[in-house]
DNA sequence: GGCATATAGTTGTTTATGCAACTAAACAAA
DNA sequence: TTTGTTTAGTTGCATAAACAACTATATGCC
């Protein structure tokens, strides 16, 4: 049976990604229970800044797989929350470099722990081998459509 | 290595589901190229109605993994597009039964073909065995968080 | 019957996405 | 230097999601 003919009843789940939205919802809920008032989308931006502070908005677009307007607005909201600061680049005046504030730095440990816990809940009973294959498939799908 | 400790660098992709958003975007693009003016979210509602016409909004919530306000507004928009019709249930006056119009019925074949093609593009080079495992993992994740 | 509770659906608010159109700065070619 | 093109970021608009608060109907219990 060729790949493109697997059962149509299974189409929907694949396309809409109910698993990833379930993870996202749970993580959001776990943030809320810990009295963390950030969205998972905001967190995903912080996540990349924790890895490399001072990225440009364009770099954040590439890292987070979002378009430029999305990042503009996420940075707007993160700035309102005083979690990041836009700093104009001195070399290239078109560029904003995004820096974490001290408040944001303090969020790293707690939120990363919550994310790890959430993922552990999600993957309970799934073997590492299965996870590896699932990741490969998702990566391949992404590459195919890029 | 226990499941809950796999590399943090891989956290992000899992959580944000970049693969499923990539599929969604591609399907939307393919709809647009075929001059089909519906969103994939609207399509996902039609998809379930094609399987069983006349579902209640609550049934659509369960089938599409959305909450009630989301379905209310999707049905609003589908009604504006004259693709579905709300019909009050005679047995229970709280319930709206959602019926496809003739226009919507005509969309089924073409959009399902486009969805199959999109999925085929996405899964090019992925074996059926890998797909099976990926689906199992995603299902398990969903069940774990339900 | 009358009251409490559960269920179906709607509305308001905030946040986010996708797309198109736009501004401003950099760069390249002549 | 001027003209055209690319790149970085912003703004406007439509759609959608999550959550809370709400209305209306149904149901269960006394």
Image: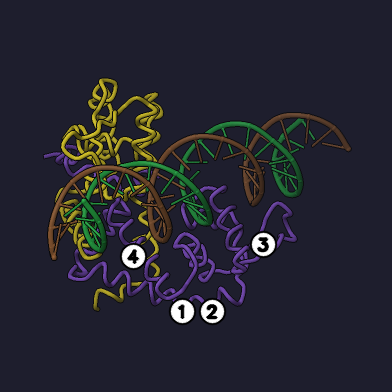
Chain colours: A yellow, B purple, C brown, D green
- Between A58 and A2, the one nearer to me in the picture: A58
Q: Secondary structure at mark 3?
A: strand
Q: Residue at x 47, y 72 (%)?
A: B36
First in sequence, mark 3 or 2: give its number.
3
Q: Secondary structure at mark 1?
A: helix
Q: Is residue B85 left or right of residue C16?
A: right
- Residue A146 lies, in percent from the top left, at 23, 62
A108 shown above or below B87:
above
Q: Which dot marks residue B109?
A: 1
How far apart are the alpha carbons under marks 2 and 1? 7 Å
Q: Residue at x 34, y 61 (%)?
A: A14
First in sequence, mark 2 or 4: give its number.
4
B97 shown above or below A38:
below
- Residue A57 lies, in percent from the top left, at 26, 41
**Within-10-Å neighbours for mark 2: few <14, some 14–19, many 20+:** few
How far apart are the alpha carbons under marks 2 and 4? 22 Å
- Residue A133 lies, in percent from the top left, at 17, 57
Q: Which residue is mark 2?
A: B106
Hey, which residue is sitting farthest left in the picture? B1
Q: Tell whether label 1 touches label 2 (CB within 8 Å).
A: yes
Q: Which residue is mark 4?
A: B26
**Within-10-Å neighbours for mark 4: few <14, some 14–19, many 20+:** some
Q: Which residue is mark 3?
A: B86
Asked if marks 3 and 4 fall on the same chain, the answer is: yes
Asked if marks 1 and 3 fall on the same chain, the answer is: yes
First in sequence, mark 3 or 4: give its number.
4
How far apart are the alpha carbons under marks 4 and 1? 18 Å
Residue A24's image quarter?
A: top left
Q: Tell whether label 1 touches label 4 (CB within 8 Å).
A: no
Q: Is residue A60 visible?
A: no
Q: Residue at x 49, y 68 (%)?
A: B37
Q: Secondary structure at mark 4?
A: helix
């Amino acid at each position: 049976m060729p790949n493109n003919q697997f059962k149509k009843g299974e189409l929907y789940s694949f396309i809409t990604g109910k698993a990833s939205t379930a993870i996202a919802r749970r993580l959001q809920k776990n943030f809320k229970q810990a009295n963390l008032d950030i969205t998972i989308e905001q967190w995903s931006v912080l996540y990349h800044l924790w890895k490399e502070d001072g990225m440009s908005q364009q770099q954040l677009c590439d890292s987070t797989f979002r378009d430029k307007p999305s990042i503009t607005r996420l940075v707007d909201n993160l700035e309102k929350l005083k979690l990041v600061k836009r700093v104009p680049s001195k070399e290239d005046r078109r560029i904003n470099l995004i820096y974490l504030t001290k408040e944001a730095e303090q969020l790293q440990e707690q939120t990363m722990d919550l994310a790890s816990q959430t993922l552990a809940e999600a993957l309970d009973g799934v073997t590492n081998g299965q996870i590896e294959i699932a990741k490969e498939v998702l990566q391949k799908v992404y590459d195919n459509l890029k």
